[in-house]
Image (cartoon, grey):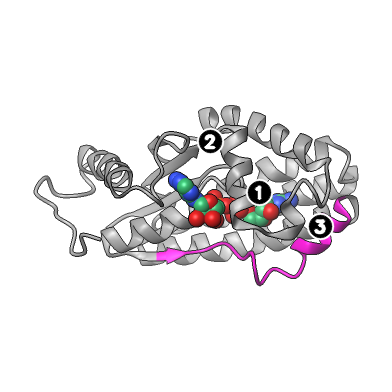
Amino acid sequence: MTVIVLSGPIGAGKSSLTGILSKYLGTNPFYESVDDNPVLPLFYENPKKYAFLLQVYFLNTRFRSIKSALTDDNNVLDRSIYEDALFFQMNADIGRATPEEVDTYYELLHNMMSELDRMPKKNPDLLVHIDVSYDTMLKRIQKRGRNYEQLSYDPTLEDYYKRLLRYYKPWYEKYDYSPKMTIDGDKLDFMASEEDRQEVLNQIVAKLKEMGKLEDDWKPNLVK
Ligand SMILES: Nc1ncnc2c1ncn2[C@@H]1O[C@H](COP(=O)(O)OP(=O)(O)O)[C@@H](O)[C@H]1O
Ligand SMILES: Nc1nc2c(ncn2[C@H]2C[C@H](O)[C@@H](COP(=O)(O)O)O2)c(=O)[nH]1
């Protein structure tokens, strides 16, 4: 049926929407490696030392996920390989990667993307981007409560998060691997409000129908 990739800043609600959407469409969810990621706490402790290693870790897991998702052709992915360079470039721009690491990273990314180009299904069918403001992002990061992501752990994270938001706008505009759409993550509380959840699902289903990826009379198996 379809491969849908989600995108958005930290805490935007990607993992949550991945679960909701995959259940609704009856497809498989692919989650990011976060709680089982051994490099992530090291990165927050010493970003300069671990930025490159963390990126290689994420890139590897994202490559594995997208290959598998494109092979099955029936999946929803919580953040994908298409966002990988956004993170790395931002970290490189603030001095967390050497020129050699930057060159090596882009060569590796280029090789991986060429591999995807050789697959029978080369691209996802749809990108769903969750747009959030800094205030919403921070509230959700606090709500989730991972220690090393809190401003109390490292006050410089405020700049890091604000910078990340600034990198998303041009990234989204440039993204052209598939059709794309945006969900207003500030307005639509798809976790607490049943009505908002249905509104988000309706928007995505309408887009899939418009693209001919779902039949006009398609109905979900699971209404919840
Ligand atoms: N639309 C939303 N409204 C309210 N809370 C949300 C929403 N989306 C996510 N959350 C909450 O915010 C936190 C971060 O969500 P998560 O799905 O882990 O984000 P991401 O995967 O984008 O980092 C979680 O505690 C989740 O329950
Ligand atoms: N340096 C990088 N950090 C990344 C990347 N992808 C995710 N992350 C961090 C950000 C969060 O602390 C955590 C989980 O992200 P969510 O958006 O799922 O909350 O991992 C990356 O590519 N580089």
Distance between the alpha carbons at the discs numbered 3 and 1: 24 Å
Q: Is residue 113 visible?
A: no
Q: Which residues are magenta?
A: 29-47
Q: Which residue is mark 2?
A: 132
Residue 115: % across, % down: 56, 57
**Picture coordinates of residue 20 (x, y %)?**
36, 58
Q: Where, by quadrant of the figure, is residue 19 drawn?
A: bottom left
Under tag 1, what secondary structure?
Answer: helix
Q: Residues within 10 Å of mark 2 (few under 14, many from 20)?
A: many
Tell whether circle 2 marks a residue whose Cβ is less than 8 angstroms from ligand 1. no
Position of 56 compared to 9: left or right? right
The residue beneath circle 3 is 43
Between circles 1 and 2, the one closer to the viewer is: 2
Residue at mark 3: C-beta within 8 A of ligand 2: yes
Question: Which residue type does callout 3 highlight?
Answer: Phe
**Residue at 39%, 56% in the rendered image:** 121
Quadrant location, the C terminus: bottom left
Sequence-wise first label, 3 or 1: 3
Query: Badge 3: few (under 14), some or many (20 or more) residues near its Cα, within 10 Å?
Result: some
- For the residue pair 71 and 197, the one nearer the viewer reads as 197
Q: Is residue 132 magenta?
A: no
Identity of the amino acid at label 1? His
Q: Residue flagged by tag 2: what amino acid is it?
A: Val
| Residue hosting label 1 | 110
Lower position in the chain sequence, tag 2 or tag 3? 3
The N terminus - image quarter: bottom left
Q: Residue at x 80, y 49 (%)?
A: 152
User: Label 1 vs label 2: CA separation?
Assistant: 29 Å
Task: Calculate the distance from the C-alpha at mark 2 to the C-alpha at mark 3.
Answer: 24 Å
Residue 35 lies within the magenta run: yes
Which label number is shown at residue 181?
Answer: none
